[in-house]
Amino acid sequence: MSLLPRGSLLVVRALPAAASAERRVLGAELDAALDRALTRASGDESA
Protein backbone atom coordinates (compact mmCIF):
# COMPACT_ATOMS: atom_id res chain seq x y z
CA MET A 1 0.00 0.00 0.00
CA SER A 2 3.01 2.28 -0.18
CA LEU A 3 1.78 3.39 -3.61
CA LEU A 4 -1.16 5.25 -2.14
CA PRO A 5 -0.83 8.89 -1.17
CA ARG A 6 -0.61 9.48 2.58
CA GLY A 7 -4.06 9.66 4.15
CA SER A 8 -5.73 7.65 1.38
CA LEU A 9 -8.60 5.32 2.14
CA LEU A 10 -8.85 2.07 0.19
CA VAL A 11 -11.99 -0.05 -0.02
CA VAL A 12 -11.78 -3.41 -1.75
CA ARG A 13 -14.91 -5.20 -2.89
CA ALA A 14 -14.49 -8.72 -4.21
CA LEU A 15 -16.74 -10.96 -6.21
CA PRO A 16 -17.56 -14.39 -4.76
CA ALA A 17 -15.14 -16.06 -7.20
CA ALA A 18 -12.27 -14.31 -5.41
CA ALA A 19 -12.76 -16.67 -2.46
CA SER A 20 -11.20 -19.51 -4.43
CA ALA A 21 -8.60 -17.49 -6.34
CA GLU A 22 -4.90 -17.81 -5.63
CA ARG A 23 -3.33 -15.12 -3.47
CA ARG A 24 -0.76 -14.19 -6.14
CA VAL A 25 -3.52 -13.72 -8.73
CA LEU A 26 -5.53 -11.50 -6.39
CA GLY A 27 -2.39 -9.53 -5.57
CA ALA A 28 -1.56 -9.00 -9.23
CA GLU A 29 -5.10 -7.87 -9.99
CA LEU A 30 -5.06 -5.47 -7.03
CA ASP A 31 -1.69 -4.05 -8.15
CA ALA A 32 -3.01 -3.52 -11.68
CA ALA A 33 -6.19 -1.84 -10.43
CA LEU A 34 -4.21 0.48 -8.15
CA ASP A 35 -1.87 1.35 -10.99
CA ARG A 36 -4.81 2.26 -13.24
CA ALA A 37 -6.48 4.31 -10.51
CA LEU A 38 -3.31 6.20 -9.64
CA THR A 39 -2.58 6.87 -13.32
CA ARG A 40 -6.07 8.32 -13.79
CA ALA A 41 -5.79 10.37 -10.60
CA SER A 42 -2.53 11.91 -11.80
CA GLY A 43 -4.20 12.95 -15.06
CA ASP A 44 -2.03 10.72 -17.26
CA GLU A 45 -4.64 8.95 -19.39
CA SER A 46 -2.08 7.79 -21.97
CA ALA A 47 -1.05 4.73 -19.94
Image (cartoon, helix red, strand yellow):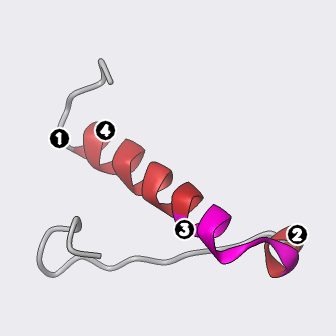
Q: Earlier in the sequence, mark 3 or mark 4?
A: 3
Camera-nearest label, 1 or 3: 3
Camera-nearest label, 4 or 2: 2
Tell me whether the residue at label 4 lies in contact with that at label 1, contact meaning CB atoms closer than 8 angstroms. Answer: yes
User: Which residue is more in the foreground, 18 or 44?
Assistant: 18
Tag 1 secondary structure: loop
Marks 4 and 2, how far apart in space?
Answer: 27 Å
Image point (49%, 78%), residue name: 11
Task: Point out the residue furthest to the left here.
Answer: 6
Tag 4 secondary structure: helix
Amino acid marked by disc 4: Arg
Q: Earlier in the sequence, mark 1 or mark 3?
A: 3
Image point (33%, 24%), residue name: 47
Q: Residues within 10 Å of mark 2 (few under 14, many from 20)?
A: few
User: Which residue is more in the foreground, 32 or 44?
Assistant: 32
| Residue 23 as seen in the image, left or right of residue 16 | left
The numbered mark at residue 17 is 2
Q: Give the range drawn in magenta.
A: 20-27
Marks 3 and 4, how far apart in space?
Answer: 20 Å
Q: Is the magenta stretch mostly helix, strand or loop?
A: helix
The numbered mark at residue 42 is 1
Tell me whether the residue at label 3 lies in contact with that at label 4, contact meaning CB atoms closer than 8 angstroms. Answer: no
Camera-nearest label, 2 or 1: 2
Task: Point out the residue furthest to the top here.
Answer: 46
Q: Mark 3 points at which residue?
A: 27
Amino acid marked by disc 1: Ser
Camera-nearest label, 2 or 3: 3
Tell me whether the residue at label 2 lies in contact with that at label 3, contact meaning CB atoms closer than 8 angstroms. Answer: no
